[in-house]
Amino acid sequence: MNNSTFSRLGRICCKYIFPLVLLLYPLRHVYWGLDFWDTGYNYANFRYMGLEHMDSMWLFATYLSNLTGHFLTLLPGGHTLLFMNLYTGLFVSLLALVSYYFLTKRMRLPAWAVFVGELAAVSLCWCPTALLYNYLTYVLFLAGVLLLYEGLSQEKNTFLALAGVMLGSNVFVRFSNLPEAGLIVAVWVYGFIACKKIKKVLQETGFCILGYVGAVSAWLGLISLRYGFSCYVNGIKRLFAMTEIATDYKAASMLYKMFSGYVDHFYWVSRILVFALPGILACFVFPKGWKWIKGVVCAASAAACAVWLYGSRDAAGNRNFCDLRFDEYSSMLKPGILFLILTLAVCLVRIFSKKPDKKEKLFAGLVFLSVFITSIGSNNGLLPSLNNLFLAAPYVLWNIYGFCTKCKESRFPLLPLKALAIMFVSIFLFQGLGFGVGFAFAEATGIKKIDTKVENNDILKGIYMSGEKAAWMEGLSAYVSRNGLEGREVILYGNIPSVSFYLGMPSAFNPWSDLTSFGAASMEAAMKEIEAELSEKGEEYPVVILNRDYVLDLKEFWRSEDVKLDMILQFMEDYGYRATYVNDKFVLYENGGKHD
């Protein structure tokens, strides 16, 4: 092949193949299942959105994500797990494609580097796409970052106001997105870098704040018109009060978990840098003409570091740094967090270096802020930042490539650091892509088997899962269908909230009522409301489904140390409930029913 042929192939890849892969790759696991926790829980909230079947705190704390999800359920196939996985997966595709086109068109990064970075970013998306309060957050946050960049670099105040609109709207996607307002700090940092007058910086800040306040006011007004302002306020009040019982949601606890994640992983940073010492020594000892000797020493040191990282094991025999079981978080967690540290370091270097122009410094600052801010407001430590590397991964990988290929040797030898950088990036990409191919979320771990389908449930049609889970759902689905229970309200307990969506049975109050954030007082109020409806309105008795692990005796009701479970048991005892269906996972109770 001649150069023109290669050039033509390159253009085809950049224009068609890379975007097509980034569109489809996020959809690779849409048929993998089955998750009894977050996936179906969120889809149930989308399908049955409103105060009748949802906890008011959760409805208002994640209002825009629920509204968006509800719209998706109205699309063709939106009542099924497969199509909802497809629709929500497209949000990841959108993040990857928007980042790809921005980085290649506006930042002029080479398409191959951006493509590899986007593949890595998508692969590290551990969070199920059903959690739109995360992915819609990332979409609006990305839009805010790009609009800030355009507004500041081109001095267009309209873009700055729109950036404020994106960040203000994000408060209604997830209330804990409030700290994202800190992104407006970029206006002042860039004002300092570009030597702008204070009046100009204040004006630009004002446009950002105007957009932010306008969006908050608009959404608050719409919610107040539909539900009432006091209803919204009471729901958000409960969100703040919830931290007293769910202490991991306290601001101090979330910040500690985030910062400790960085601090703890400096253990690995320091050990990796130790392997640069032989190369540094070789660069000082051997004469300038002996480059190949220095290269061999540096390469050998980097290879020894890789062997040590993969070979280091704890007392139980598990790999300390990263695992080759790609259906586990351990395969990517430590390399991923070290990549976050590398990202922050690269951004700081570019900001304070003389060579980059002011626009690149602005972008580096925005990438730094996006990585840092994404984890604020979450109780998952640094995992949210790993889930949102769509700008950071390509930018950092390109800078590492430039450092390794273009950065000339100085008084301090850089060759050992280049060798370690190549080694680490190779491990990061290998582990990250392996994780992306092998991991799909289910009950906070990875799905282990996908060899069986449920044949008697339209909602689960086309979804592969383990044979054990398929047997559980087939039996329960058959009973629900045979007895016409679809559409009946259900009370669920035992970390099985997804059952509401999978069976087409709306929750009587909150599908995941055993969450710590749904306190005993909220549970008591919900149970009293059900009892009032039964006595005053003659409402149909809700079905009760419990996790079999929580059931001590099928013949009579018992008491447990779980206050909320005891409320359900007391309710069933008072209203004559009996177990009518039992399998290895579920026990279904009906009012006055006979055991099946």
Image (spheres, grey):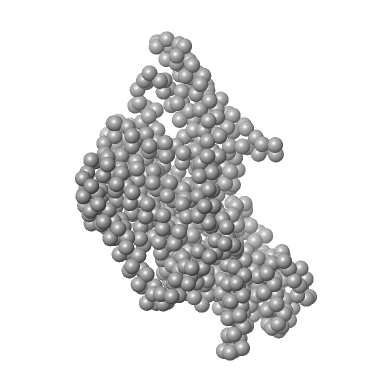
Looking at the rendered structure, the number of numbered marks drawn on it comes to 0
Picture quarter with the N terminus: top left
Q: Is residue 378 left or right of residue 531?
A: left
Residue 371's place in the image compared with 403, above or below, is below
Q: Is residue 174 visible?
A: yes
The residue positioned 35% from the left and 65% from the top of the image is 216
The residue positioned 29% from the left and 34% from the top of the image is 356
Q: Nearer the viewer, residue 249 or 28?
A: 249
Q: Is residue 293 left or right of residue 204?
A: right
Residue 486 x/y as whole percent: 58, 77
Q: Quadrant of residue 366?
A: top left
Residue 302 x/y as whole percent: 51, 25
Residue 300's place in the image compared with 520, above or below, is above
Picture quarter with the C terminus: bottom right
Residue 555 x/y as whole percent: 78, 75
Residue 209's place in the image compared with 381, above or below, is below
The residue positioned 69% from the left and 72% from the top of the image is 566
Q: Nearer the viewer, residue 522 or 428?
A: 522
Q: Nearer the viewer, residue 4 or 422?
A: 422
Q: Quadrant of residue 444?
A: bottom right
The residue positioned 56% from the left and 55% from the top of the image is 248
Q: Is residue 495 left or right of residue 168?
A: right
Q: Quadrant of residue 465?
A: bottom right
Q: Is residue 498 visible?
A: no
Residue 331 x/y as whole percent: 57, 42
